Amino acid sequence: MEFVPAPAVHRVLCADCGTPIVPNSANLCVACLRNSVDITEGIPKQASVSYCRNCERFLSPPSTWTIARPESQELLAICLKKLKGLNKVRLTEAHFIWTEPHSKRLRVSLTIQKEVLTNTILEQVFEIEYLVQYGQCPDCTKLAAKNTWKALVQVRQKVPHKRTFLFLEQLILKHGAQKDTISVKEVRDGLDFFYSQRSHAQKMVEFLNGVVPVRSKASEQLLSTDTHTNTANFKYTYSVEIIPICKDDLVCIPPKLARQLSNISPLTICVRVGNSLHLLDPATLQICEVTSPIYWRSPFESLASVTDLVEFTVLDVEPSGTTRGKYVLADAQVALSGAFRSHADDAAMDYDTAMSSQIFHTRTHLGGILQPGDTAMGYFLTNANFNSDDFAALPAHRVPDIVLVKKAYPNRRKKNKPRAWKLRSMAKEEGEEGETGAGRGVVGRMGGRDQKKVDEDYELFLRELEEDEEMRGAVNLYRAKDVRPGAGSGLAGGKTRKKVQHAMDVDEGAMDEDVEVPAATDEEEEEPDFPDVKLDELLEDFDEMTLEEA
């Protein structure tokens, strides 16, 4: 094969430095061409980005605030938007250069290309330094100022206790519905939620419609208007009213509504409250569901609540065989608690001797959990006087003497054992940090003369969580730290105080809070079926985890 030499490459000398180069239109080498032509002209080498330390967002021009992690693509896009003149060149590469996190500086390396002469494209790499300027976004500015809310959700329930709002607070925390709330204020019959945007308030109203039976009403107030641009500024208020019936309440349904609800007996017990009411007839185990529209068309109130419950002792239980889910129909014989005691202190009872020693026959839905000798809480209808026309219209043979509601555990309650779990709460008041805390929630902050009643409601709410597994599944329980038997727990012997934190006794007499009472003795055995909260139901409280020095 004959060798064919490659064509000769003609070279010329650079016009500035004299280096042999391939001929081009400028007759300059790359180094001299960069010295004579700067393609980065018009692009600033220093710039600034705005950063809000409260919400940790960067300003994305022109007016959008975006959450961006350090050295992320979102932050790089924000930095490139701040540069002027990039539309005149071709950007081929951009990346961050590492800087100290506390330096408030961002360094970005850019690689650009531009045609400087005919068929001559020059590429250049340079750095741009950004200064991170701290400031406040408009949303955080409104939060810092007072009375700058734009939407308000007023949640009300006309009942004498606060247990509904204690449970509602836990539902809000579990589903994260409080993240857009500016502040929460406690009022006499409920809570007020303040928001900076109308859409956030509407989202809260939709959440409340899904978890509790409510009816809502919206209104608006005109603050200012501009006739030139045809724009107006409004404040929006949403009034949300919760049905005034709670779990374990005794209810008398109006006869006309009872016939529409599968002809159920008017005298029922509220066994569950979700986005509708579940009413149970303890004599037949018949259950009906009352939705919000049905209730508000013909509203009715509860005859008695859990504060009117009376303690009974179960003498005999005979199941009839009828079951419905977890409920078992049974015939029971009960008597007032302490009816057959021979102690002298029985004179403190509010009932006469004949009534206290009487045995009552009743039909109950608790046949699956009651045993002879157990203690149950129920409504004593024989001595009750209700201001209700619907109850007065009931035939006498359809009104039982006793309506048992739930099983009680008096021996365990007397020992005041500290609970191994706790609840989170919303921290939205001035001076508190973060959105949630481990202290008392927004319910009970008002203090004053009702503080004792709020503490009793909080203890009853904790007991309901212990005794109702279905209710516990709807909230988040957290593991409590350093739960040890000690003074006041009732486990170390000696004496214990009347009230212990998160293990208080509901006010059952006129005793002073500081009066010491003897602890429960070992002769009173605990109930074996006490519903203890299992360890696998508890969550770790990661907000309180810190690194301790060795």
Image (cartoon, rainbow, N blue to C red):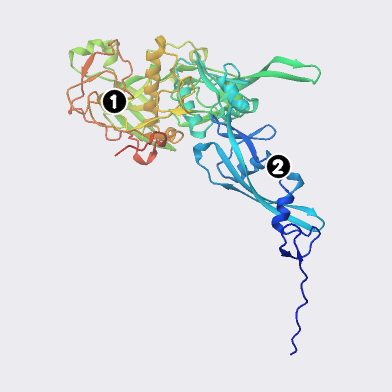
Q: Which of 341 and 106 is in front in this view?
A: 106
Q: Which of marks 1 and 2 is in front?
A: 2
Quarter-of-image position of residue 62? top right
Labels 1 and 2: the sequence-earlier one: 2
Give neighbour class at mark 1: few <14, some 14-19, many 20+ (Cα, 10 Å): some
Residue highlighted by disc 1:
413
Helix, strand or loop at mark 2? loop
Q: Can residue 30 be seen in this view?
A: yes
Q: In this view, does 45 lie above or below 8?
A: above
Q: Do the residues labelled 1 and 2 touch (CB within 8 Å)?
A: no
Badge 2 amino acid: Ile
Query: What is the spatial separation of the Cα atoms under label 1 and label 2, in whole angstroms?
Result: 75 Å
Give neighbour class at mark 2: few <14, some 14-19, many 20+ (Cα, 10 Å): some
x, y percentage for residue 291? 57, 27
Q: Residue at x 43, y 24 (%)?
A: 248
Residue highlighted by disc 2:
43
Quarter-of-image position of residue 58? top right
Q: Which of 55 and 129 is in front in this view?
A: 129
Q: Is residue 136 above or below residue 74?
A: above
